[in-house]
Structures are given as structure tokens and as C-alpha cells.
Image (tube, rainbow, N blue to C red):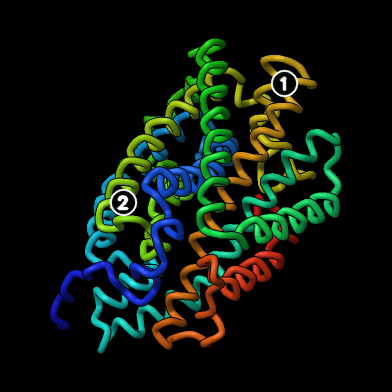
Amino acid sequence: MPAFPEPDDGNSREGNTEEEGDEQKFTFLQACGLNTMNMFGTGPLITIPYCLQSVDPVGPHCMVGYAVACFACLCDSFVWAEIGSIWPRNGGSYTYLKQLYGEDSLGQLMGFMFIWQFLISGPAELASGYIAIAEYMLYIVDTNDYWIRVYISLGLCFFTSLLLCRKISEVGCFTLFLWSITIFAMIFTLVCGFWNYDQDYLKSPPGVFDDHKKLIWSIAAATRFGIYDMTGYYDVCSFGGDCKDPRRTIPKSVVTTCFIVGIIYILVYVAVLGVMNYKDYVDDYADDADESPFGIMSVFTEELFNKTFANIITVIVCITIFGSNFAQLCGYSYLPYAAAMDGNFPSCFAFKTTSGIPLVSLLTISALSIIWCFFLLML
């Protein structure tokens, strides 16, 4: 068994040198913003109806599994915080696997396997956000046309890449702007949801807790969506080498965002499920549905107000989800870059612009995500 590596001093070659200056590094607040947006965009604003569909029988008891996922992720955040403070470098999981398993032994293999599978999983996750935005936008034009959805997804993919090809300081400022939109969307959902709350809508089907075997499988199925939604509290670990005071910024931002967002997620689920009878809309989100459904927040807002106001909120939700993709792509672009800096990936991915952005890695991940934009979200 390899010896446990010594903690990093934070001055790795990936970008923690004094010459770069603090203006080319992310602050604690910006790190929290990127973590939070990464989580919120792919959170309840997308998954509520799909999580309902995942349990048998369909019903609000899916929240049991969802709460289990939130608690598990909170525990996991302490792990990320610890290893992030030990090795405050760029690369996230790639760097940690390499260090934990030993740079001169299994670490090379684990890092190699992670970075190559990431080229599939990372772009697919990004595409799910683009597709979700397209589904919300289709609500405004009142159509379910497949190709319109694809064109919107591809356009968003290009636009996100364009915004990230800027100085880190400018990316950080734009992060705070998108973060403010995300906070507004959450406040709107919670206030409107609990103002019109009806506890009868949260009643599960009779006898659902009597069949323990089926209940356990249902909880497990719902937990998947909770884990998916919570993904992102460790986004800062991907670009840890480009943070100010990383050994403090990384653990504080990881644990803080995971804890706060986990609580908000559960409240959002309760707020949305307490406004509408899930039986009226949940079948539209089934795998065998004839058409791609509209976003749940559009349906939620129209139920409370009207179509016009729902269109406005739909745009705000789209910006929120866009912020998630913005944060994801920002973090993901540092993963192949870190591997290339170690000589474990094609050297062209080690290219970094004078503004601090790993350009080749960024554009490659964006290009790969285009492939997944042709799929449906429910698949």
C-alpha cells in the first residue's frame, strides 16, 4: 500500500504562483457562487417531476429518498473539503485520485481512467442543462418541436463557451451576476409556494409505507435524483489552484454551499409539491410520454398566476440553469488541463491563455457536449 502523500503547500505549477496576481484568481464569494449555481441549475427546477416518477407508486414520498441524498452529500462535502485543503490544486477528482492512490503507483491509473471517462460524463451532464433550458424556452413559444429544442441547446453551448473565454476576474464578476438571478429564483419559488401551500397535495398514496421492500427500492430510486441535484458543491476543487487562499477558500466554500443548498432544495420540493396536485402533471414526464414536457417551474407559475407572468419566470429560470452550465463548464475545463500539465493527457490541453483560461480544454468539452444535445432529457 502506497504511503499517504504529504499535504500540498498550495504552490503547484497549475496556477498558484505569485506572478499571476490575485486579480487572476477566484475569491471566496465567487467560489461559493460557482458552487451554488452548479447545484441549483440542475436541481429541483428540473428534476421534481422526474423524481416523482421514479418511485412506485408515484407520489411525494420520493422526498424520503431525496432527503437521504442531501444528508449523504453533506457528509461527502467534508471529505471534499479535507482533501481540497490538503491538495489545493487544479484538477479536482483527477488530482485527488492520483495523490490518494500514489503518484508512482495506482494513482496514475486511477487518474487516467477518471479523465477519459469524464470526456463522456462531463459533456453529457452539461448537455442536460442545455436541454433543460430549451424545454423551458419552448414553453414561451408554446411548441414541443424537437429541432427547435436542439437549435436552442446548441446556441447555448456556443454562448457559454464564449463567455468563459475571458479574464478570470471578468468570469468572477459575471458569476456574481448570475448568482443573484439564482437567489431571486429560489426566493420566488419558496415565497409563492408556501404562500399557496396545501398540505393535502403532499399526501402519499394509501399503503405506500406498508410494502417495505418496494419502499426501499423507491427511496433508492429517488436518491439518484437527490445526488444528481446536489452535484456541484465541489466545483471549486476543479480550479482550486486558481483561488485566492485556496487552503481556506476550498473547504469553507464546499461545506457552506452544500449545507445551505441542501436545506433549500428540500424546501423547494415541499413548496412546489404543495401547490399543485402531482397527479395532474406527473404523467407528462414519464419515459413513454409522447412529447418532451415543459419545465416544471413554468407549470408551477402558470398555476399560481397566468401565462404572461409564467413566461417571465421561465426566462429567469432559464438564466438560473444557464448559470449552472456556466459554473460547470468553468470547473470542467480545468480537469483535462490538469492532466495535460502532468503529462497524462495530450500536451495541447495544457495551453492556458494570458487571462488564465485553459482554452483548448474548454473548447473540447463544449464540442463534445454538442453530441448529447441531440438527445431527450428523459433518456
Q: Position of residue 339 (x, y in %)?
A: 43, 79
Q: Amino acid at mark 2?
A: Thr
Q: Is residue 168 visible?
A: yes
In percent of width and height, residue 10 lies at 27, 67
The picture places residue 199, in percent across and down from the top left corner, at 48, 13
How many other residues sit within 10 Å of disc 1, few (<14), some (14-19) or many (≥20)?
some
Q: Which residue is mark 2?
A: 249
Quadrant of residue 25 in the image? bottom left
- Name the N-terminal-most of marks 1 and 2: 2
Point out the image quarter for the C terminus. Answer: bottom right
Q: Residue at x 25, y 89 (%)?
A: 104
| Of residues 283 and 15, the one drawn nearer to the viewer in this rendering | 15
Residue 128, position as x, y percentages in the image: 63, 54
For residue 283, side relative to residue 259 (left or right): right
Above or below 295: residue 83 = below
Residue type, label 1: Glu
Q: Disc 1 versus disc 2: distance between alpha carbons?
A: 40 Å
Q: Secondary structure at mark 1?
A: helix
User: Which residue is at the front of the view, 127 or 159?
Assistant: 159
Residue that appears at 50% across and 15% down: 194
| Closer mark to the observer between disc 1 and disc 2 | 2
Residue lying at 15% horizontally and 75% vertically, measured from the top left = 4
Q: Point out the image quarter for the N terminus.
A: bottom left
Name above or below for residue 259 compared with residue 224.
above
Question: Is 153 placed above or below 165 here?
Answer: above
Eyeballing the image, is 178 above or below 152?
Answer: above
Query: Cβ–Cβ below 8 Å for labels 1 and 2?
Result: no
Q: Which residue corresponds to mark 1?
A: 302
Q: Quadrant of residue 317?
A: top right
Residue plotted at (40% across, 39% down): 65
Q: How many circles with numbers are drawn on the protein?
A: 2
Label 2 SS: helix
